[in-house]
Image (cartoon, rainbow, N blue to C red):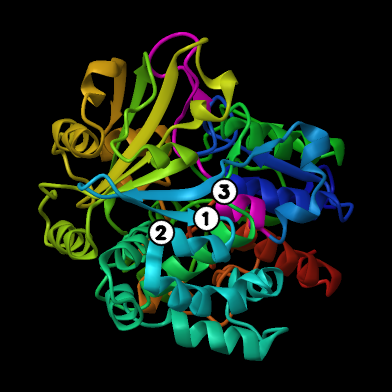
Amino acid sequence: MTAAGYDAIIVGSGPNGLAAAIVLARNGLRVMVYEAADEPGGGMRTEPLTLPGFAHDVCSAVHPLGIGSPFFRSLPLGKHGLTWVQPPAAVAHPFEDGTVALLERSTAAMDQHLGTDAAAWRALMDPFVSRWQQLFGDALGPLKVPRHPILLARFGIAAFPAATWLARGLFRHAPARALFGGIAAHATVPLRSPPSAAFGMILGVAGHAVGWPIPRGGSASITRALVSHYCSLGGELTTNRLVESLDDLPPARAVLLDLTPRQILRLHATHLSTVYRAQLERFQYGLGTFKIDWALDQPIPWRARESARAATVHLGGTLEEIDSNRQQEWAGQPAERPYVLVVQPSLFDGTRAPAGKHVAWAYCHVPNGSTFDMTDRMEAQVERFAPGFRNRIVARHTMAPADLERHNPNLVGGDLNGGEASLAQLFFRPALRPIPYATSNPGLFVCSSSSPPGGGVHGMAGYYAARLVLRRIRARHLR
């Protein structure tokens, strides 16, 4: 520790910032986390956005990578109040004819939904589901020598192509193609561009291996558990503390930024090289997001009733429709029939709404920074698969890209993933460097979703950045 200072200061308290703080604190370092908002957590917050008694997740809601995170699984978060709620099925993808494809927890149960394509689905998923812990340990991180090279190489072969190419090459019928495409469409990469299949693969494997659970009480429960554990290790956290210059910070050996490139460039006294700053300036953000929260007097009336077996429902119709709309979004036009992700946590967690009432959470992607109001188009898409839905709305709360960015400045233009996960930015983010968490300033590090492995509530970017800081402190490169 420096004289009258800290070993490490972390700016930002999203899942990666808190993960980094825990790694450093449990190794005996004195750590301070500064958060500009009045509460920690970044996107992991739960608030009564519509009416009193209705608990809505402000950003993240469902967490397959949270429960599957190699780092989070090493923490005693259950002892700090985190309880995962597992719906019977991970994902539902309904169709207009009243049928539905479900991502079941067991790959053997996919026969009832995918018919003759179920064998191809199992052949694609089973090798990785059976070894999901080894896969996640190698895949959720930076480029490095893998512990399980054959497994990772096999995954890479399956995951590298475009999602449309993989789905059409493996599956003969619409349900399997649409189910895989809908899962892959969580990322904003165009579905006809590589490596979009990677997101369908990693989230599909997670669905079978660990489910797509919701935290009881909302996503703020994850934040509370992480903060509680961090503080039990002696860590310090200060909210309502906006850092505009590194000169404002107390002395520290290392500063870790849970920030995206745009926020880093706005910081004063970073002492970054001209070359590094130029790379940050060229960093590409992904599509934006338009989000709606609803207070409902009854559950969503899905035409395909089995959709209610999952907390997460993908509304997009066929693979061709999802792909076409994604191309429209990348061309700068909001989709007429947007691909909508709907989550209804109150079906499985009674703490989220008053007795007999429900909450629902939904978003669609839009061009980055779009000002177009997607409310009517999103609600029409829900109504398309759940006739009578609008009659059950008691209140709604909308967040356009600018609203999301005001809530959390890391969500630039409404981008939830800290930057586009294109081939160029999948591993080399936020800049082209052999160690992505290190900046040109030896005492300054990046630990946000703008560093590998990218977006999602898993804390792995924070974990790897903190491990780097520990190595450099032990080597006395940071005094």
Residue 64 inside the magenta-drawn segment: yes
Residue drawn at 40 percent across, 10 percent down: 51
Residue receiving disc 1: 104
Q: CA distance from mark 1 to mark 2?
A: 9 Å
Q: Is residue 385 left or right of residue 105?
A: left
* Tag 1–tag 3 contact (CB < 8 Å): no
Residue receiving disc 3: 246
* Tag 1–tag 2 contact (CB < 8 Å): yes
Residue 382, can we see it? yes
Q: Is residue 394 left or right of residue 228?
A: left
Q: Main secondary structure of the magenta part?
A: loop
Q: Specify which label sits upstream in the sequence, 1 or 2.
A: 1
Q: For the magenta stretch, what is the residue range?
A: 46-69
Instruction: Give the vertical position of 375 relative to 470 (above or below).
Output: above
Secondary structure of the residue carrying numbered label 2: helix
Residue 438 location (% of width, % of height): 59, 70
Q: Amino acid at mark 2?
A: His
